[in-house]
Image (cartoon, coloured by chain):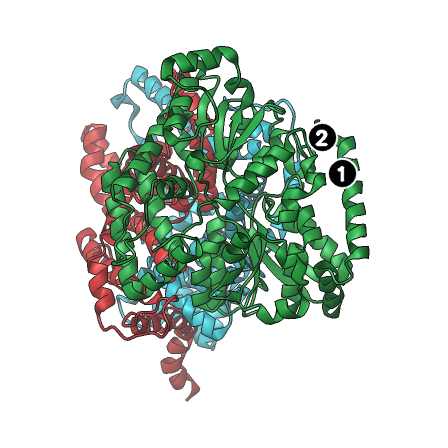
Amino acid sequence: MIRLKSKKTLPLLFVLPTMGILSFVTIFPFIYAFVLSFFQWDYQIMGRPFIGIQNYLNVFQDGRYFSALGTTVIILSAALGLEFMLGLALALIFVEEFKGRNAALVMVVLPVMMLPIVVGYTWKLLWNDQYGPINHILTGLLGKEINILWLAKTPTAFISIIVTDLWEWTPFIFLILLAGLTSLSPEIYEAAAIDGASPWARFRSITLPLMRPVIGVALLFRGLESFKIFDIIVALTQGAPGTSTETISLYLYRIGFQYFRMGYASAANIVLLVAVGCFLVVAVRLLRIERGG
Amino acid sequence: MGDKRHIYTNKEPKRIQKRKNLKAVKIARYVIVGLAVAFALFPIVWTVLTSVKFPSDILHSPPIWLPKELTFAHYIGVQELNGYKSFKDSLIIAGLSTACVVVIGSLAAYSITRWKTGGKSFPFGLLTLRVLPPIAVVFPVFLFFKELRIIDTYLAIILMHLVFNLPFTVWMMRGFFREIPQEAQESARIDGCSEVGVFWRVVLPLAAPGLIVTAMFCFIFSWQEYPYALILARRRVIPLSVFLPSLFGQQMIMWGEVGAISTISMLPLFALGILARKYFVRGLTMGTVK
Amino acid sequence: MKLNKKNAWVVFVCIVLVLGAGAAFAQRSSMKVAIEEGKKYAGKTIVFPTESGLFMQGPLALAPQWEKATGMKVEVVGMDYYALHDKQIAEHLAATGAYDIVQYSPLWVPDFIAAGLMEPLDRYVEKYMNKEDLEDIPPIVRKNLMMWGGTFYGLPIDLDILTLFYRKDLFEDSQNKAEFESQYGYELRCPQTWREFQEIATFFTAKYAPDIYGAAIQRAMQTYTWFEAPFVAYGGRYFNPETMEPEINNAIGVRTLTEMVEQNKVMPPGIETWDFMDVLSAWLSGKVAMIITWPPIGRWSEGYGTYTKQLAWVPKTEIAGNVGYGPMPLGRSTHAGCFSLGVNSGSKNKEAAYLFAQWASSPEISLQTVMLPFALCDPWRISHFEAPLYRNAWGNAGEYLDTLKESAMHGVWELAIPAAFEYFRALEEAMTAAYGGKDVQAALDEAADKWEKITNRLGRETQRKFYIEWLRSVGQSP
């Protein structure tokens, strides 16, 4: 009797805490926000008038919303591309055994463990045009006076943000790719080597195809993480100059927690969540990531 | 597992490559590794140096690379600003949320692996929760928690850290559980062990290394987290990630203290990373690749 | 006279004596009443949110005195200027009751009142305040820092009038004078117009850079503050009072911002990211000829109090005795921020919080605060400007105080209507974009567009009423 009963209830019992907590902190608030998104909830206004889908219409006419999305995508794609290339190169080097490999591995991976907000502020000091070492190093390397106002102009601010992001997260992609490379079976390479295939050919026709799922996972993980980019921007530029480096997370933060437009912020958040959801479905299809089971 | 993973290039027949080439490759490799290490370490070293420089040396143009005199005053300054209390808050939040997540998450992962609870796409569906933009999530949560009156408590922040750590744990632990041979579980069942018993006495001990890796990652994620804490931490609870920006005033940026608290904030994670370095690559292999 | 450690002791003893005398003669001084009544709340804690950094050093220095006098506890919580606005509202919306005191700048008040965050203080003022102490506050300060719609909401602690500091040694150098006059056709003096400001800055930069630059003004946080004074002085209005259409992007706005962008070119390289600190250290180390900033720099320029622990990081002044003071060009300076203390409506110890505020803003204590070398509170009471102690703190301290008072009475007040914070953030975004190279007209058009959206959202008619009321309160006809 007990055994029979447990066969049905135990699996559910095991999943229950997880599902309970997750729905408690995601589903209920989500419903709350959904309801709120149909009201004008600005703290300066008395009452909370019902305004139907007006908030949603406003989101779609909000140029700043879309320019923040654009900024996010620019940073994401540039950072992700560079991180992937650097990470892959490093992984290909580190997959081989060499003297001091373990020590070097630990050191290369350290940035991943820093608080992103600390990373942001540290780099803010590094980029500083007067006191920071970066201009100083460039001056030394190039042999002429370099005085770039990294964070004051839009193009260099983007470069600063991307390099900072790259510094922290390249090791992450590198680790995943290294894990993937390490798990490839050596026999395949032996066969290829006997056939006399060049290293490049081996890389293209064996490594890349076999690594495809791993690369997919690495890019997806990192891509979605950098879509959330917030800490580094807060520390480095606060969206300046103008709002040119304002990302979607920063903009949402401002609507919600600086201007306190709760109804509008709810609508803007829901639009974003739906967009991310759609993107995910498409991305997963495209990358053909194994869906478990 | 480890013994099966050979380093494939060692097995390459040497005749294919010329010796000269090999030497050039070797040098190039060391140069690249050297550059990568320098690039990775430089900002960290700079931060640590900042924390022991005198204020006049920190904001100096041109920058001072190696200060002539050192000071530890900033580490005392951090104390005056309640910085170590934030360190404690961070430890409590990261520690408790990790403990919760490992227990709850493994249960769910086991159920999913053993009984296929929730169907094929369930784990991946869970994983997508991890990628929700925190700002988008925390916004309704703020309003909701306000009703529950739990803003500015450990509980509020820990709960939110579960949002991104639970799916991760389920995903990772599922990978580890699948690798545990069915025979061990079956024989335990034949011996009359209950399902809970099998999980507790057979499966968990076998998956212990995986559990350690997962816990370590969860700790790191929780330690690093900023947006949720920014909004839910107020006065009583101030984790490090929220404490740090408060050192940036309009009229006075306490760079020395920023350096000191940054250095302190790195220590637990660096220690973890170095202690558990061999699990790192392994853990990622299981969790993401399989 | 340079204030060294010994002199500082003399000053300190004098303060103690004056305080003692004040306490003895004025039987019901606001300070004494606050202390007596405050003792009822011995053992209670009040939480005081304030601006982090140097400003916070003032409250941190005050708190122990209050604690000792009444047995209450004061917990000072610091956050940056913008966060001070955000967090106080957020806290109120979250109903955590975490803060007892409200520290506000006038431009936030309409928002704070709308959010229900501010406790009306009339009954407390009636009950506890010595009316003579109110007379000691200039009417313009009373009107802008304490009252809205005839109700008391707070007590001032800091009047932030921007001031132009210039290097007398450079300006009075006969060779500089001759060269300047032959180039520009008028006498080298503290600039009276923004054109003069630009030309003088250009002159010095051309002559001395990179050792000395003509001018430096902070361009990072709160940069809109430096826009307000010239914009208003040129006759600019933020809105058309009839239609509430923004006018910041009209010819006057464009002229103002264009001039600011032009100024950047003769200021030190990298000025676009300079904040208070950068300006301060460049000035004290003698690397700029003019700055426009908050008053405390005037005190530090003379080495007043820079030996204290809190100011250890401030570069040693190289320019003591060489500093001249003036209002911003055209005689209009911005009241850049300013702070008052109010009581949070969610507080559980409202009266205790009020008593602390009354104590902190009382003539005796506030004189101490505005003379604290390291804090950022600047004089605001009539008695502060006239205090012999202050006027003799260094050689030309009298001149300093007169300039501050004069500028303050003709100061430009920051727009204080609902969502002023948001309007100014939009303006600031336009300004940093223009510093970064964006076309000035385009940048301001974008800001005006954002302003329109804010106005539409909050109701054009409502906003118009607030705006007209604000115009009246700052003495402009709608």
Q: Amino acid at mark 1?
A: Val
Chain letter, colour green in render = C
Front in this rendered view, residue A219 or B138: B138
Whether labels 1 and 2 share one chain: yes
Q: Residue at x 77, y 50 (%)?
A: C19
Left or right: C333, with B124 as reference point:
right
Q: Chain of mark 2?
A: C
Marks 1 and 2 in Cβ contact (< 8 Å) = yes
> Chain A is which colour?
red
Front in this rendered view, residue C414 or A143: C414
The image shows residue A26 at horizontal and vertical percentages of 37, 68
Report the disc number at residue C3. 2
Gap between marks 1 and 2, in whole Å? Answer: 9 Å
Q: Amino acid at mark 2?
A: Leu
Q: Residue at x 36, y 75 (%)?
A: A47
The image shows residue B85 at horizontal and vertical percentages of 62, 53
The image shows residue C323 at horizontal and vertical percentages of 57, 26
Report the disc number at residue C11. 1
Q: Secondary structure at mark 1?
A: helix
Q: Quadrant of the N terminus of chain A?
A: bottom left
Q: In this orientation, does residue A70 appear?
A: yes
Q: Quadrant of the C terminus of chain A?
A: bottom left
Q: Residue at x 81, y 51 (%)?
A: C20
Q: Residue furthest bottom?
A: A1
Front in this rendered view, residue C428 or B166: C428
Q: Using a 10 Å C-alpha cutoff, classify the residue at mark 2 as few (fewer than 14 neighbours), some (14 to 19) or many (20 or more).
A: some
Earlier-in-chain disc, 1 versus 2: 2
Chain letter, colour cyan in render = B
Report the disc number at residue A224. none
Q: Residue at x 68, y 58 (%)?
A: C359
Q: In this orientation, does residue A258 appear?
A: no
